[in-house]
Image: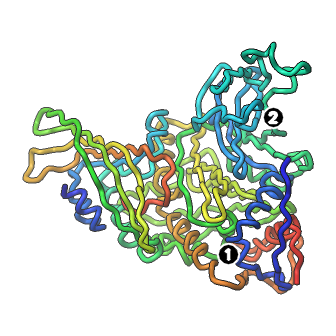
Amino acid sequence: MKYLAALDRHDMKAWLACFAEEGSYTCISRENHDAGLPVAMMLDDTHARLRDRVKFIDEVWSGTYEDYATRHFVQRFECIPGNGGRVTVRSNFIVSYTNRRGGSDILVTGVYEDDIDLSGTAARFKSKKAIMDTVTTPRYLVYPI
Amino acid sequence: MTSTPEVSVRWPAEYNVLPKEVFHRKDVYQAELAKIFYGPEWHPLAHISEIPNKGDFKTLQIGEAPVLIVHGDDGRPRVFFNSCPHRGTQLQICARGSTKEIECPYHRWLFNLRGDLIGASGMDQFEPNFRKENYGLKELRSGEFSGLIFATCSDQAPELEVFLNGTTDYLKKALGGDGRLKLIGYQKTIYGTNWKEYNDNEGYHPPLLHRAFRLLRWQGGKGSNGITEFGHKVMEAEVQQPKPGFLDDHSLVEFRDTSTPPRSVIVSFWPMTTIVKHMDVINIRYAFPLSPDDTEVHYAYYAHQDDSPELLAHRVRQASNLLGPSGFISLEDGAVFSRVHGGSRALGTVAFQKGYEGKPFQAPCFVGQNDEASNLIRWERYRQTMGFDRD
Protein backbone atom coordinates (compact mmCIF):
# COMPACT_ATOMS: atom_id res chain seq x y z
CA MET A 1 0.00 0.00 0.00
CA LYS A 2 2.91 2.32 0.77
CA TYR A 3 4.21 1.50 -2.70
CA LEU A 4 0.99 2.54 -4.43
CA ALA A 5 0.65 5.70 -2.35
CA ALA A 6 4.27 6.68 -3.09
CA LEU A 7 3.76 6.27 -6.85
CA ASP A 8 0.44 8.13 -6.94
CA ARG A 9 2.10 11.00 -5.01
CA HIS A 10 5.05 10.85 -7.45
CA ASP A 11 7.25 10.55 -4.35
CA MET A 12 10.18 8.67 -5.82
CA LYS A 13 12.21 8.57 -2.59
CA ALA A 14 9.30 6.85 -0.84
CA TRP A 15 9.08 4.48 -3.83
CA LEU A 16 12.77 3.63 -3.41
CA ALA A 17 12.27 3.00 0.32
CA CYS A 18 9.88 0.13 -0.55
CA PHE A 19 12.80 -1.95 -1.87
CA ALA A 20 15.32 -4.06 0.10
CA GLU A 21 19.06 -3.38 -0.27
CA GLU A 22 19.28 -6.16 -2.88
CA GLY A 23 15.89 -5.20 -4.31
CA SER A 24 15.05 -5.08 -8.01
CA TYR A 25 12.26 -3.73 -10.18
CA THR A 26 11.19 -4.78 -13.67
CA CYS A 27 8.38 -3.41 -15.81
CA ILE A 28 8.00 -5.55 -18.94
CA SER A 29 5.32 -6.15 -21.59
CA ARG A 30 3.59 -9.51 -21.61
CA GLU A 31 4.55 -9.78 -25.28
CA ASN A 32 8.25 -9.83 -24.39
CA HIS A 33 7.77 -11.81 -21.17
CA ASP A 34 5.82 -14.64 -22.83
CA ALA A 35 8.16 -14.80 -25.84
CA GLY A 36 11.22 -15.06 -23.60
CA LEU A 37 12.50 -11.70 -24.87
CA PRO A 38 14.36 -10.04 -21.97
CA VAL A 39 14.12 -6.34 -22.91
CA ALA A 40 11.90 -4.48 -20.43
CA MET A 41 10.30 -1.04 -20.38
CA MET A 42 12.22 -0.40 -17.14
CA LEU A 43 14.90 -2.74 -15.85
CA ASP A 44 16.31 -1.89 -12.43
CA ASP A 45 18.00 -5.14 -11.54
CA THR A 46 20.25 -3.67 -8.82
CA HIS A 47 19.71 -1.15 -6.04
CA ALA A 48 22.05 1.25 -7.87
CA ARG A 49 19.67 1.15 -10.83
CA LEU A 50 16.70 1.85 -8.54
CA ARG A 51 18.51 4.90 -7.17
CA ASP A 52 19.33 6.03 -10.72
CA ARG A 53 15.65 5.82 -11.70
CA VAL A 54 14.85 8.26 -8.90
CA LYS A 55 17.54 10.55 -10.35
CA PHE A 56 16.12 10.27 -13.89
CA ILE A 57 12.68 11.36 -12.75
CA ASP A 58 13.54 13.94 -10.09
CA GLU A 59 16.61 15.54 -11.71
CA VAL A 60 17.18 14.61 -15.35
CA TRP A 61 13.70 14.73 -16.89
CA SER A 62 12.24 17.31 -14.53
CA GLY A 63 10.43 20.12 -16.35
CA THR A 64 10.41 18.47 -19.78
CA TYR A 65 7.67 15.83 -19.66
CA GLU A 66 3.94 16.46 -19.55
CA ASP A 67 3.04 15.39 -16.05
CA TYR A 68 0.10 13.09 -15.49
CA ALA A 69 -1.74 11.92 -12.38
CA THR A 70 -1.95 8.16 -11.79
CA ARG A 71 -4.15 5.96 -9.61
CA HIS A 72 -3.10 2.38 -9.00
CA PHE A 73 -5.87 -0.16 -8.35
CA VAL A 74 -4.49 -3.47 -7.13
CA GLN A 75 -6.10 -6.76 -6.19
CA ARG A 76 -4.04 -9.54 -4.64
CA PHE A 77 -5.09 -13.00 -5.82
CA GLU A 78 -2.25 -15.25 -4.66
CA CYS A 79 -0.05 -15.22 -1.58
CA ILE A 80 2.42 -18.02 -0.91
CA PRO A 81 4.49 -17.92 2.33
CA GLY A 82 8.13 -18.97 1.96
CA ASN A 83 11.02 -19.51 4.38
CA GLY A 84 12.78 -16.84 6.46
CA GLY A 85 9.96 -14.33 6.46
CA ARG A 86 9.60 -14.30 2.69
CA VAL A 87 6.34 -14.29 0.80
CA THR A 88 5.55 -14.32 -2.91
CA VAL A 89 2.48 -12.40 -3.94
CA ARG A 90 0.69 -12.00 -7.25
CA SER A 91 -1.81 -9.21 -7.86
CA ASN A 92 -3.74 -7.71 -10.74
CA PHE A 93 -3.26 -4.02 -11.41
CA ILE A 94 -4.99 -1.30 -13.37
CA VAL A 95 -3.34 2.12 -13.48
CA SER A 96 -5.42 5.07 -14.65
CA TYR A 97 -3.96 8.36 -15.81
CA THR A 98 -5.27 11.89 -16.05
CA ASN A 99 -3.56 14.31 -18.39
CA ARG A 100 -3.15 18.08 -18.09
CA ARG A 101 -6.34 18.70 -20.05
CA GLY A 102 -8.30 16.73 -17.45
CA GLY A 103 -9.16 13.64 -19.49
CA SER A 104 -8.70 10.22 -17.87
CA ASP A 105 -8.09 6.77 -19.29
CA ILE A 106 -6.41 3.49 -18.51
CA LEU A 107 -2.62 3.73 -18.73
CA VAL A 108 -1.69 0.05 -18.30
CA THR A 109 -3.07 -3.15 -16.84
CA GLY A 110 -1.35 -6.38 -15.88
CA VAL A 111 -0.01 -8.52 -13.06
CA TYR A 112 2.51 -7.84 -10.31
CA GLU A 113 4.78 -10.71 -9.27
CA ASP A 114 6.38 -9.75 -5.97
CA ASP A 115 8.94 -11.37 -3.70
CA ILE A 116 8.56 -9.65 -0.32
CA ASP A 117 10.80 -9.76 2.74
CA LEU A 118 8.74 -9.51 5.95
CA SER A 119 11.65 -10.19 8.35
CA GLY A 120 12.54 -6.55 9.09
CA THR A 121 10.59 -3.75 10.71
CA ALA A 122 8.86 -2.94 7.42
CA ALA A 123 7.97 -5.22 4.49
CA ARG A 124 10.30 -4.63 1.54
CA PHE A 125 10.46 -5.89 -2.03
CA LYS A 126 13.29 -8.28 -2.82
CA SER A 127 11.95 -8.14 -6.33
CA LYS A 128 8.94 -6.57 -7.92
CA LYS A 129 7.93 -7.35 -11.48
CA ALA A 130 5.10 -5.55 -13.29
CA ILE A 131 4.08 -7.62 -16.33
CA MET A 132 1.95 -5.39 -18.53
CA ASP A 133 -0.85 -6.88 -20.63
CA THR A 134 -0.77 -3.46 -22.27
CA VAL A 135 1.84 -3.96 -24.97
CA THR A 136 1.49 -0.59 -26.68
CA THR A 137 1.25 2.07 -24.00
CA PRO A 138 -1.09 4.97 -24.85
CA ARG A 139 1.61 7.48 -23.87
CA TYR A 140 5.24 7.30 -22.75
CA LEU A 141 5.76 6.19 -19.16
CA VAL A 142 7.61 8.52 -16.82
CA TYR A 143 6.88 6.81 -13.52
CA PRO A 144 7.27 3.13 -12.66
CA ILE A 145 4.07 1.06 -12.44
CA MET B 1 -4.13 1.07 -55.73
CA THR B 2 -6.26 3.73 -54.10
CA SER B 3 -7.99 6.87 -55.23
CA THR B 4 -5.85 9.91 -54.55
CA PRO B 5 -7.72 12.79 -52.96
CA GLU B 6 -6.73 16.18 -54.29
CA VAL B 7 -6.05 18.72 -51.55
CA SER B 8 -4.43 22.12 -51.63
CA VAL B 9 -2.38 23.89 -49.00
CA ARG B 10 -1.01 27.44 -49.12
CA TRP B 11 2.74 26.97 -48.85
CA PRO B 12 4.90 29.97 -47.88
CA ALA B 13 7.38 31.27 -50.46
CA GLU B 14 10.29 31.18 -47.96
CA TYR B 15 12.22 27.90 -48.25
CA ASN B 16 12.63 27.48 -44.46
CA VAL B 17 9.00 28.16 -43.48
CA LEU B 18 6.20 25.56 -43.25
CA PRO B 19 2.45 25.85 -42.75
CA LYS B 20 1.27 24.35 -39.44
CA GLU B 21 -1.98 23.10 -40.93
CA VAL B 22 -0.23 20.10 -42.52
CA PHE B 23 0.15 18.65 -39.02
CA HIS B 24 -3.60 18.57 -38.36
CA ARG B 25 -5.76 18.56 -41.47
CA LYS B 26 -7.55 15.25 -42.00
CA ASP B 27 -7.76 15.74 -45.75
CA VAL B 28 -4.00 16.31 -45.92
CA TYR B 29 -3.46 13.14 -43.88
CA GLN B 30 -5.63 11.07 -46.25
CA ALA B 31 -3.67 12.41 -49.20
CA GLU B 32 -0.39 11.56 -47.42
CA LEU B 33 -1.50 7.96 -46.99
CA ALA B 34 -2.22 7.71 -50.71
CA LYS B 35 0.73 9.67 -52.09
CA ILE B 36 3.48 8.79 -49.59
CA PHE B 37 2.68 5.62 -47.63
CA TYR B 38 0.94 3.81 -50.51
CA GLY B 39 3.04 5.73 -53.03
CA PRO B 40 6.50 5.06 -54.47
CA GLU B 41 8.46 4.80 -51.20
CA TRP B 42 10.02 1.74 -49.53
CA HIS B 43 9.26 0.88 -45.90
CA PRO B 44 11.46 -1.18 -43.54
CA LEU B 45 9.11 -3.72 -41.90
CA ALA B 46 11.15 -6.41 -40.15
CA HIS B 47 14.66 -7.70 -39.63
CA ILE B 48 15.08 -11.33 -40.59
CA SER B 49 16.10 -12.03 -36.96
CA GLU B 50 12.48 -11.28 -35.96
CA ILE B 51 11.29 -14.13 -38.20
CA PRO B 52 14.39 -16.38 -38.27
CA ASN B 53 12.73 -19.72 -39.16
CA LYS B 54 10.58 -20.97 -42.03
CA GLY B 55 6.93 -20.27 -41.21
CA ASP B 56 7.69 -17.40 -38.82
CA PHE B 57 5.65 -14.28 -39.42
CA LYS B 58 5.29 -10.73 -38.17
CA THR B 59 2.46 -8.25 -38.68
CA LEU B 60 2.83 -4.49 -39.03
CA GLN B 61 1.35 -1.58 -41.00
CA ILE B 62 2.37 0.51 -43.98
CA GLY B 63 0.46 3.70 -43.29
CA GLU B 64 -2.84 2.27 -42.09
CA ALA B 65 -2.66 -0.84 -44.30
CA PRO B 66 -2.02 -4.08 -42.37
CA VAL B 67 0.83 -6.19 -43.75
CA LEU B 68 2.05 -9.70 -43.05
CA ILE B 69 5.74 -10.55 -43.37
CA VAL B 70 6.27 -14.30 -43.78
CA HIS B 71 9.47 -16.36 -43.83
CA GLY B 72 8.64 -18.73 -46.69
CA ASP B 73 9.28 -22.49 -46.77
CA ASP B 74 11.79 -21.74 -49.55
CA GLY B 75 13.72 -19.47 -47.15
CA ARG B 76 12.57 -16.25 -48.84
CA PRO B 77 10.73 -13.61 -46.81
CA ARG B 78 7.61 -12.22 -48.51
CA VAL B 79 5.37 -9.30 -47.65
CA PHE B 80 1.59 -9.61 -48.19
CA PHE B 81 -1.36 -7.44 -47.35
CA ASN B 82 -2.72 -8.96 -44.15
CA SER B 83 -6.14 -9.38 -45.71
CA CYS B 84 -7.90 -12.38 -47.26
CA PRO B 85 -8.34 -11.84 -51.03
CA HIS B 86 -11.86 -13.27 -50.69
CA ARG B 87 -13.70 -10.91 -48.31
CA GLY B 88 -10.86 -8.97 -46.73
CA THR B 89 -10.61 -10.67 -43.31
CA GLN B 90 -7.38 -9.98 -41.45
CA LEU B 91 -5.40 -13.21 -41.69
CA GLN B 92 -3.04 -12.96 -38.72
CA ILE B 93 -3.74 -10.88 -35.65
CA CYS B 94 -0.69 -11.67 -33.49
CA ALA B 95 2.34 -9.35 -33.62
CA ARG B 96 4.56 -12.39 -34.27
CA GLY B 97 4.10 -16.12 -34.56
CA SER B 98 4.86 -19.26 -36.50
CA THR B 99 2.63 -21.29 -38.80
CA LYS B 100 2.73 -24.01 -41.47
CA GLU B 101 0.06 -22.42 -43.63
CA ILE B 102 -2.19 -19.38 -43.55
CA GLU B 103 -5.87 -20.04 -43.00
CA CYS B 104 -8.60 -17.42 -43.07
CA PRO B 105 -10.95 -18.16 -40.17
CA TYR B 106 -14.07 -16.78 -41.87
CA HIS B 107 -14.55 -19.29 -44.75
CA ARG B 108 -11.44 -21.43 -44.17
CA TRP B 109 -9.65 -20.42 -47.36
CA LEU B 110 -6.18 -21.88 -47.07
CA PHE B 111 -2.91 -20.39 -48.38
CA ASN B 112 0.63 -21.76 -48.33
CA LEU B 113 3.59 -19.76 -47.00
CA ARG B 114 4.23 -18.40 -50.52
CA GLY B 115 0.73 -16.92 -50.59
CA ASP B 116 -0.81 -19.37 -53.09
CA LEU B 117 -4.45 -20.35 -52.54
CA ILE B 118 -4.41 -24.09 -51.81
CA GLY B 119 -8.10 -24.61 -51.41
CA ALA B 120 -11.45 -23.16 -50.45
CA SER B 121 -14.58 -24.87 -49.28
CA GLY B 122 -17.38 -25.19 -51.86
CA MET B 123 -15.16 -24.17 -54.76
CA ASP B 124 -17.33 -26.12 -57.24
CA GLN B 125 -20.09 -23.56 -56.68
CA PHE B 126 -17.93 -20.46 -57.34
CA GLU B 127 -18.29 -18.42 -60.53
CA PRO B 128 -17.62 -20.58 -63.61
CA ASN B 129 -14.32 -18.94 -64.53
CA PHE B 130 -12.92 -18.88 -60.95
CA ARG B 131 -9.19 -19.57 -60.94
CA LYS B 132 -7.25 -20.28 -57.74
CA GLU B 133 -4.27 -18.53 -59.30
CA ASN B 134 -6.18 -15.23 -59.25
CA TYR B 135 -6.87 -15.47 -55.53
CA GLY B 136 -3.42 -15.76 -53.97
CA LEU B 137 -2.49 -13.33 -51.22
CA LYS B 138 -1.67 -9.87 -52.56
CA GLU B 139 2.13 -9.78 -52.45
CA LEU B 140 3.97 -6.47 -52.28
CA ARG B 141 7.29 -5.74 -53.98
CA SER B 142 9.90 -6.48 -51.34
CA GLY B 143 13.65 -6.57 -50.93
CA GLU B 144 16.28 -7.09 -48.29
CA PHE B 145 19.49 -5.42 -47.17
CA SER B 146 21.63 -6.73 -44.28
CA GLY B 147 18.60 -8.75 -43.16
CA LEU B 148 16.33 -5.71 -43.12
CA ILE B 149 13.17 -6.40 -45.15
CA PHE B 150 11.59 -3.53 -47.09
CA ALA B 151 8.36 -3.38 -49.08
CA THR B 152 6.50 -0.89 -51.23
CA CYS B 153 2.83 -0.70 -52.24
CA SER B 154 3.70 0.94 -55.54
CA ASP B 155 4.89 -0.30 -58.93
CA GLN B 156 6.32 3.19 -59.48
CA ALA B 157 8.93 2.95 -56.70
CA PRO B 158 12.52 2.77 -57.98
CA GLU B 159 14.56 -0.38 -57.37
CA LEU B 160 15.30 -0.80 -53.64
CA GLU B 161 19.03 -0.33 -54.19
CA VAL B 162 18.36 3.04 -55.81
CA PHE B 163 16.15 4.10 -52.89
CA LEU B 164 18.94 3.06 -50.48
CA ASN B 165 21.64 5.08 -52.31
CA GLY B 166 23.96 6.70 -49.79
CA THR B 167 22.66 4.74 -46.78
CA THR B 168 24.07 1.24 -47.15
CA ASP B 169 27.50 1.79 -45.51
CA TYR B 170 25.76 3.30 -42.49
CA LEU B 171 23.03 0.68 -42.47
CA LYS B 172 25.53 -2.15 -42.46
CA LYS B 173 27.37 -0.67 -39.46
CA ALA B 174 24.14 0.05 -37.60
CA LEU B 175 22.98 -3.55 -38.07
CA GLY B 176 25.96 -5.14 -36.37
CA GLY B 177 28.34 -5.16 -39.36
CA ASP B 178 27.05 -8.30 -41.04
CA GLY B 179 23.33 -8.25 -40.20
CA ARG B 180 23.64 -11.42 -38.05
CA LEU B 181 21.41 -10.17 -35.28
CA LYS B 182 19.31 -11.76 -32.58
CA LEU B 183 16.02 -10.20 -31.43
CA ILE B 184 16.00 -9.35 -27.70
CA GLY B 185 12.66 -7.53 -27.36
CA TYR B 186 10.33 -4.64 -28.11
CA GLN B 187 9.08 -1.47 -26.49
CA LYS B 188 5.89 -0.08 -28.06
CA THR B 189 4.16 3.19 -27.48
CA ILE B 190 1.97 5.85 -29.06
CA TYR B 191 3.11 9.46 -29.27
CA GLY B 192 0.35 12.08 -29.40
CA THR B 193 1.86 13.75 -32.42
CA ASN B 194 1.70 13.92 -36.20
CA TRP B 195 4.05 11.51 -37.99
CA LYS B 196 5.94 14.41 -39.57
CA GLU B 197 6.54 16.01 -36.17
CA TYR B 198 7.81 12.68 -34.84
CA ASN B 199 10.07 12.60 -37.88
CA ASP B 200 11.33 16.17 -37.62
CA ASN B 201 13.75 15.43 -34.77
CA GLU B 202 17.13 16.93 -35.61
CA GLY B 203 20.66 17.66 -34.41
CA TYR B 204 20.00 21.11 -32.91
CA HIS B 205 18.02 19.97 -29.87
CA PRO B 206 20.03 17.17 -28.17
CA PRO B 207 22.39 19.22 -25.97
CA LEU B 208 19.55 21.63 -25.19
CA LEU B 209 16.57 19.35 -24.51
CA HIS B 210 18.35 16.34 -23.02
CA ARG B 211 19.67 17.35 -19.63
CA ALA B 212 21.41 13.98 -19.21
CA PHE B 213 24.16 15.11 -21.59
CA ARG B 214 24.90 18.12 -19.41
CA LEU B 215 24.69 16.23 -16.11
CA LEU B 216 27.07 13.59 -17.43
CA ARG B 217 29.27 16.29 -19.05
CA TRP B 218 28.81 14.16 -22.15
CA GLN B 219 30.07 15.84 -25.33
CA GLY B 220 29.14 14.66 -28.80
CA GLY B 221 32.10 13.17 -30.66
CA LYS B 222 33.37 14.19 -34.09
CA GLY B 223 31.26 12.87 -36.89
CA SER B 224 29.43 13.50 -40.12
CA ASN B 225 25.76 14.07 -40.94
CA GLY B 226 24.39 13.63 -44.41
CA ILE B 227 21.12 13.56 -46.26
CA THR B 228 20.43 11.58 -49.41
CA GLU B 229 18.51 12.49 -52.54
CA PHE B 230 15.51 10.50 -51.23
CA GLY B 231 15.55 12.39 -47.93
CA HIS B 232 17.16 9.71 -45.77
CA LYS B 233 19.32 11.13 -42.99
CA VAL B 234 22.58 9.39 -42.10
CA MET B 235 24.87 10.09 -39.17
CA GLU B 236 28.05 8.61 -37.84
CA ALA B 237 29.99 9.96 -34.85
CA GLU B 238 32.67 8.91 -32.42
CA VAL B 239 31.27 8.02 -29.02
CA GLN B 240 32.82 9.90 -26.15
CA GLN B 241 32.30 7.89 -22.99
CA PRO B 242 31.08 10.10 -20.16
CA LYS B 243 33.11 10.02 -16.95
CA PRO B 244 31.68 8.06 -14.02
CA GLY B 245 30.12 10.02 -11.19
CA PHE B 246 26.56 11.05 -11.90
CA LEU B 247 24.95 7.62 -12.17
CA ASP B 248 25.26 4.97 -9.45
CA ASP B 249 25.30 2.31 -12.19
CA HIS B 250 27.60 3.80 -14.81
CA SER B 251 27.28 0.74 -17.07
CA LEU B 252 24.14 2.34 -18.54
CA VAL B 253 26.40 4.68 -20.54
CA GLU B 254 29.37 2.38 -21.07
CA PHE B 255 30.56 1.03 -24.39
CA ARG B 256 31.56 -2.63 -23.99
CA ASP B 257 31.43 -4.16 -27.46
CA THR B 258 35.10 -4.25 -28.43
CA SER B 259 34.45 -5.92 -31.80
CA THR B 260 33.28 -2.67 -33.45
CA PRO B 261 34.75 0.86 -33.34
CA PRO B 262 33.11 3.03 -30.65
CA ARG B 263 30.79 4.93 -32.94
CA SER B 264 27.16 5.95 -33.07
CA VAL B 265 25.38 5.35 -36.36
CA ILE B 266 21.89 6.50 -37.32
CA VAL B 267 19.94 5.95 -40.53
CA SER B 268 16.63 7.76 -40.57
CA PHE B 269 14.60 6.66 -43.58
CA TRP B 270 12.07 8.81 -45.36
CA PRO B 271 9.20 8.61 -44.64
CA MET B 272 9.40 6.95 -41.22
CA THR B 273 11.57 4.24 -39.76
CA THR B 274 14.89 4.93 -38.03
CA ILE B 275 17.79 2.58 -37.29
CA VAL B 276 19.98 3.54 -34.35
CA LYS B 277 23.23 2.08 -33.08
CA HIS B 278 24.22 4.02 -29.99
CA MET B 279 26.57 2.76 -27.28
CA ASP B 280 25.82 -0.99 -27.37
CA VAL B 281 22.17 -0.57 -28.28
CA ILE B 282 21.11 -1.87 -31.70
CA ASN B 283 17.63 -0.51 -32.31
CA ILE B 284 15.12 -0.28 -35.16
CA ARG B 285 12.22 2.11 -34.58
CA TYR B 286 9.38 0.93 -36.81
CA ALA B 287 6.84 3.72 -36.95
CA PHE B 288 3.49 4.32 -38.60
CA PRO B 289 0.72 6.91 -38.34
CA LEU B 290 -2.57 6.01 -36.66
CA SER B 291 -4.24 9.35 -37.47
CA PRO B 292 -3.10 12.97 -37.99
CA ASP B 293 -2.73 13.14 -34.19
CA ASP B 294 -1.15 9.81 -33.22
CA THR B 295 1.99 7.96 -34.24
CA GLU B 296 2.78 4.43 -33.09
CA VAL B 297 6.40 3.41 -32.66
CA HIS B 298 7.74 -0.09 -32.12
CA TYR B 299 11.27 0.01 -30.72
CA ALA B 300 12.84 -3.35 -31.64
CA TYR B 301 16.16 -4.26 -29.98
CA TYR B 302 18.82 -6.68 -31.10
CA ALA B 303 22.02 -8.34 -29.93
CA HIS B 304 24.68 -9.78 -32.23
CA GLN B 305 24.70 -13.56 -32.67
CA ASP B 306 28.38 -13.68 -31.62
CA ASP B 307 27.86 -11.81 -28.32
CA SER B 308 29.25 -13.37 -25.14
CA PRO B 309 26.65 -13.94 -22.39
CA GLU B 310 28.09 -10.89 -20.56
CA LEU B 311 27.77 -8.61 -23.60
CA LEU B 312 24.24 -9.92 -24.25
CA ALA B 313 23.22 -9.11 -20.66
CA HIS B 314 24.78 -5.65 -21.00
CA ARG B 315 22.86 -5.01 -24.23
CA VAL B 316 19.58 -6.07 -22.59
CA ARG B 317 20.17 -3.71 -19.64
CA GLN B 318 21.20 -0.81 -21.89
CA ALA B 319 18.36 -1.42 -24.38
CA SER B 320 15.78 -1.41 -21.58
CA ASN B 321 16.81 1.88 -20.00
CA LEU B 322 18.77 4.13 -22.38
CA LEU B 323 17.04 5.02 -25.66
CA GLY B 324 13.38 3.94 -25.62
CA PRO B 325 10.14 5.71 -24.77
CA SER B 326 11.15 5.73 -21.08
CA GLY B 327 14.88 5.93 -21.77
CA PHE B 328 17.36 7.95 -19.74
CA ILE B 329 18.47 10.11 -22.69
CA SER B 330 15.32 9.87 -24.83
CA LEU B 331 12.17 10.32 -22.74
CA GLU B 332 12.16 14.06 -23.39
CA ASP B 333 11.78 13.46 -27.13
CA GLY B 334 8.36 11.91 -26.56
CA ALA B 335 7.49 14.77 -24.25
CA VAL B 336 8.36 17.34 -26.90
CA PHE B 337 6.56 15.51 -29.75
CA SER B 338 3.17 15.97 -28.11
CA ARG B 339 3.91 19.56 -27.09
CA VAL B 340 4.91 20.42 -30.66
CA HIS B 341 1.65 18.90 -31.88
CA GLY B 342 -0.39 20.80 -29.32
CA GLY B 343 1.33 24.08 -30.21
CA SER B 344 1.06 23.60 -33.93
CA ARG B 345 -2.73 23.88 -33.60
CA ALA B 346 -2.09 27.59 -33.24
CA LEU B 347 -2.50 29.23 -36.65
CA GLY B 348 0.43 30.22 -38.81
CA THR B 349 3.79 28.80 -39.73
CA VAL B 350 6.94 27.29 -38.23
CA ALA B 351 10.52 27.96 -39.31
CA PHE B 352 13.80 26.10 -39.42
CA GLN B 353 16.79 28.32 -38.64
CA LYS B 354 19.90 26.51 -37.36
CA GLY B 355 22.14 25.76 -40.32
CA TYR B 356 20.00 27.61 -42.90
CA GLU B 357 22.13 29.85 -45.10
CA GLY B 358 19.25 31.46 -46.97
CA LYS B 359 19.32 29.20 -50.01
CA PRO B 360 17.92 25.75 -50.85
CA PHE B 361 20.02 22.66 -50.12
CA GLN B 362 21.08 20.38 -52.95
CA ALA B 363 20.79 16.74 -51.84
CA PRO B 364 22.75 14.59 -51.39
CA CYS B 365 24.91 16.70 -49.11
CA PHE B 366 26.63 16.81 -45.74
CA VAL B 367 25.32 19.12 -43.03
CA GLY B 368 26.36 20.38 -39.61
CA GLN B 369 26.05 17.97 -36.70
CA ASN B 370 23.95 20.33 -34.58
CA ASP B 371 21.79 21.71 -37.39
CA GLU B 372 18.07 21.45 -38.01
CA ALA B 373 17.77 23.01 -41.45
CA SER B 374 18.70 19.84 -43.36
CA ASN B 375 15.16 18.62 -42.57
CA LEU B 376 14.11 21.16 -45.21
CA ILE B 377 15.38 18.73 -47.86
CA ARG B 378 12.72 16.29 -46.68
CA TRP B 379 10.13 19.02 -46.56
CA GLU B 380 10.89 19.98 -50.14
CA ARG B 381 10.44 16.36 -51.18
CA TYR B 382 7.20 16.23 -49.17
CA ARG B 383 5.87 19.41 -50.78
CA GLN B 384 6.62 18.16 -54.28
CA THR B 385 5.18 14.68 -53.65
CA MET B 386 2.01 16.21 -52.26
CA GLY B 387 1.75 18.68 -55.14
CA PHE B 388 1.58 21.80 -52.95
CA ASP B 389 2.70 24.97 -54.74
CA ARG B 390 4.70 27.72 -53.08
CA ASP B 391 3.11 31.16 -52.82
Q: Can you give x and y, in whole percent of width and height, for residue A63 in the image?
A: 43, 77
Badge 2 amino acid: Glu
Q: Is residue A29 left or right of residue B94?
A: left
Residue B383 located left or right of residue B65: right
Q: Are marks 2 and 1 on the same chain?
A: yes
Q: Is residue B112 left or right of residue A62?
A: right
Q: Please state which amino acid type lies under the numbered disc 1.
A: Asn
x, y percent for residue B246: 39, 68
Q: Quadrant of residue B340?
A: bottom right
Vertical placement of residue B15 versus B245, above or below: below
Q: Chain of mark 1?
A: B
User: How far, Cα to Cα, is label 2 from label 1?
Assistant: 41 Å
Q: Is residue A57 left or right of residue A32?
A: left
Q: How is the image coloured?
A: rainbow
Can residue B15 be seen in this snapshot? yes
Image spot of residue A25 (x, y percent): 32, 49
The disc placed on residue B370 is: 1
Residue drawn at x 70%, y 39% is B179
